Image: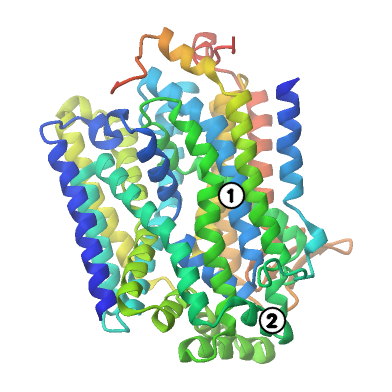
Amino acid sequence: MKRLLLFFAVIALYASHQDFWYWRTAHPLVFGFVPIGLFYHGCFSVAAALLMWMLVKFAWPSHLEDEIRESGNEEDGPK
Amino acid sequence: MIPAIVVFIYLAIVLYIGIFAFRRAKGKEQAEDYFLASRSLGPFVFLFSLFGTNMTAFAILGSSGHAFSNGIVTFGLMASSSGLIIPLSIFFIGTRVWALGKKHGFMTPVQMFRDRWECGHIGTVIFVVQAVLLVPYIIIGIMGGGTTLHTISGGLVPYWFGGAIVAMVVMSYVFFGGMRGTAWVNTFQTVLFLLFGAVALIVIGVGMGGFRTAAQSMLAAPALAPLLTRERISPLYFFSYTFIPLSAIAFPHILIFCLTARKMAQFKKTVIFYPICILAIWLPCVFLGVMANRVTDVPEIRAKQEARRVLATQGKTMTPEARDELREKAAGDDVIMLLLQRYAPFWLAGLLGAGIMAAVMASDSQILALSTMFTEDVFAFYGGKRRFGEGVQVQTGRIFIVLITMFAYAVALRAPETIFELAIQYAFSGYAALSPLLVAALFWKGSTKWGALAATVWTALAVITVAIFQHSVPAPAPGPATLVWSMGGVEVLTRTPGGTAVFGFMPVVPMVIVSALLMIVVSMLTKKPKDATIARYFVEAG
């Protein structure tokens, strides 16, 4: 269930990149000088970082780490 | 001249870091140590060097130049989409490649493909396509170096000499320091150019008398107001661009970098902070590039605006050559440096110039990656390592570094395109079209070497076709695109002022889709590798 929600979160964020609603306007100017289209995509980047944090927290591929341990290749130190 | 001296001091520091890394590795003439730093990079170095590797001249010079001509759309086009797609691809693909590299000892993507699909010469074909597509990326670095030193020195250092200095410094620390030197230099450079954005924004903002006035006056000018919106770019073109960041994980230097982490946990910080790092460097550069249009007291910027105006009003009646000449004059790759010269004190302009150099010199990883690929995928694969030993393999890699740098420098002196166009049109689209190979190798048991070959050949042919098409059909003046082929009233192929459109999309979209389809269809029709081979790649999650 958690992974399904994360999958939809990824799709939703990707879809929200295509923000046609601010296409032809610079208003409002955030802080008096940042056009809204630019501000939106700045916020989009922060949202992407949050999404990555959720993926790391809830969908980390730890089986790959286990596999390395089982195969005898120590994770610490040079191979 | 003072800023140029500061930049030269910076270059000396970078050179020293590379040589220090060489001393640290003395006595270890092993391929894995030279090319992968013994897979031992810690979390901080891994995050900053991986990010720095992916940020080239393109990030500072190309982004501000593109924003100068096209407006705020530049950030959404490349930066915010990259902030989502690149960490996602590192999360899903980078971690798996790291684990396979640790388990099976791979040092290059082609080594993995050869093993995964039980092939030899098909791997060589993939190597050739990857190598050819990587060279433009190296050229960008040298072009950016030449432009930066030329502008920062106020024209005292000629373009050819600036490019030569950058090429020599990069070649030296890659030659001596290998991956360890490259990673340390990249970390130092990334810290520098992350600081660059914020400092440049404040200094230039204060110098311009505040951005509020500049933004308001741009809105009041009919010719400049559209730069604060995205109306100059179509939504389809904007959507197309989200395919470009797929190239990042398919670039061999990024994938090879993924193999250098000491632990898989080091990917965690990298994927979380990657979008923030992109935001920190791109947002100020794009914003400053747009605001440069409001600067009226820098003659070089006014000349660019005048060239742009002439192109827009009289471009249709001009010859293609005259239009190209005007396009070069209107290109804004150096606007951010012109702003620094105008508004920053000498010493600060030098430090900020060093920040720009840091981004410009990211071609080090590409040079090292090409060398790694050549020595592993060709020299070692065809028996060189067995016959001459590992020491000779490392020396061969070093000779290759010298040769490839000299070649890239020679091309950089002749290349007429702007940094941004050159990168996008060939390398990025090509690597994006190669990304289905990685996805298929890591996530689809049914993929085969023939599917991989079909996708690779398609990528090569598509890149060549786009290059020939754009060379044969001159770019039109700003405004409506030139229709080349339509079917039943639908515009299939058009030549736009900035490139090519297929059904209104950038060529990268059909390139990636057809590449993925070929991978699927051809794999379904051909014989899969042995079960034992497949089993080594697909251990189910517990």
Q: Is residue B308 visible?
A: yes
Picture residue at 50% right of the left edge, 18% below the top: A64
Picture residue at 59% right of the left edge, 52% below the top: B462
Which residue matches tag 2? B216
Question: How crowded is the residue under tag 2: few (<14 C-alpha within 10 Å), some, or many (20+)?
Answer: some
Image coordinates of residue B463 in percent, x first then y, are 56, 54
Image coordinates of residue B357 in percent, x first then y, are 34, 64
Which residue matches tag 1? B82
Q: Is residue B458 visible?
A: no
Outermost left residue: B27
Whichever of callouts 2 and 1 sits on the residue coming sooner in the sequence is: 1
Residue contact between numbered discs 2 and 1, judged by CB atoms under 8 Å:
no
User: Looking at the picture, which amino acid does disc 1 mark?
Assistant: Ser
Image coordinates of residue B137 in percent, x first then y, are 42, 56
Q: Which is more toward the observer, B472 or B116?
A: B116
Check the image and report above or below for B322 versus B33: below
Picture residue at 56% right of the left edge, 40% below the top: B87
Q: Which is more toward the observer, B467 or B372?
A: B372
Q: Nearer the viewer, mark 2 or mark 1?
A: 2
As measured in the structure, the alpha-carbon distance from the residue carrying label 2 to the one carrying label 1 is 30 Å
Check the image and report above or below for B529 versus B170: above
Check the image and report above or below for B244 versus B123: below
Instruction: Specify the quadrant of the image occupied by residue B86.
Output: top right
Which quadrant is home to the C terminus of chain B? top right
Chain of the residue where label 2 is placed in the rendered structure: B
Chain of the residue where label 1 is placed in the rendered structure: B
